[in-house]
């Protein structure tokens, strides 16, 4: 998806609206009861999507992981929606840690996380939510080379 897609443009528009309305609108949309309801709805919908597509579901801490999905069923190497991570096979501990941060972002913002994420941009290296989750852990940057210990 490019930065000029209709979805990205809608995300930027909603993000700008949220910034303009600042405290009252964002506080209302991300109030814990509203955010929790959105988070639960997103989790249930994503789990249903994964099961409908024949994915295998398992629990990793507070994250539902649905594997075996076709690549068109999620973005990039995988997508977290609510507390559900949809992927084909990206399940390393580092990736799951990265996705668990996204789960917590969903908990904090609820459904408002969608336009906020889109407004942050599709370039993961500049997207504040990807940066917070860890660019190396998410596979956006290479792991730094480690040197063997000196004798």
Image: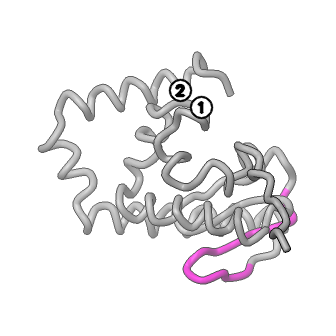
N-terminal of the two: label 1 or label 2?
2
Specify few, some or many for label 2: CA neighbours under 10 Å numbering under 14, 14-19, or 20 or more. Answer: many
- The residue sitting at the top extreme is 4
Q: Is residue 117 magenta?
A: no
Q: Which residue is mark 2?
A: 8
Coloring scheme used: one colour
- The residue sitting at the front extreme is 151
- The answer for how far apart the CA atoms under marks 1 and 2 are is 8 Å
Residue sitting at x 49%, y 21%: 9
Q: Which residues are magenta?
A: 58-69
Q: Which is in the foreground here, disc 1 or disc 2?
A: 1
Q: Is residue 64 above or below residue 104?
A: below
Q: Nearer the viewer, residue 136 or 11?
A: 136
Left or right relative to 12: residue 49: right
Left or right relative to 96: residue 16: left
Residue sitting at x 53%, y 33%: 126
Residue 122, disc: 1
Which picture quadrant has residue 149? bottom right
Left or right relative to 121: residue 46: right
| Dot 1 and dot 2 residues touching (CB under 8 Å) | yes
Residue sitting at x 76%, y 65%: 52
């Amino acid at each position: 998806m490019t930065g000029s897609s209709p979805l990205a443009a809608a995300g930027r528009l909603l993000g700008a609206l949220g910034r303009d309305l600042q405290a009252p609108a964002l506080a209302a949309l991300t109030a814990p009861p509203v955010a929790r309801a959105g988070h639960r709805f997103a989790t249930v919908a994503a789990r249903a999507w994964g099961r409908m597509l024949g994915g295998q579901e398992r629990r990793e801490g507070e994250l539902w992981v649905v594997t075996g999905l076709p690549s068109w069923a999620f973005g990039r190497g995988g997508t977290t929606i609510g507390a559900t991570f949809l992927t084909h096979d990206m399940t390393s501990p580092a990736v799951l840690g990265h996705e668990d941060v996204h789960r917590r972002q969903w908990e904090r913002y609820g459904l408002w996380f969608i336009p906020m994420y889109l407004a942050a941009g599709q370039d993961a290296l500049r997207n504040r939510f990807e940066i917070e989750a860890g660019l190396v852990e998410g596979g956006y940057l290479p792991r730094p080379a480690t040197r063997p210990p000196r004798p």
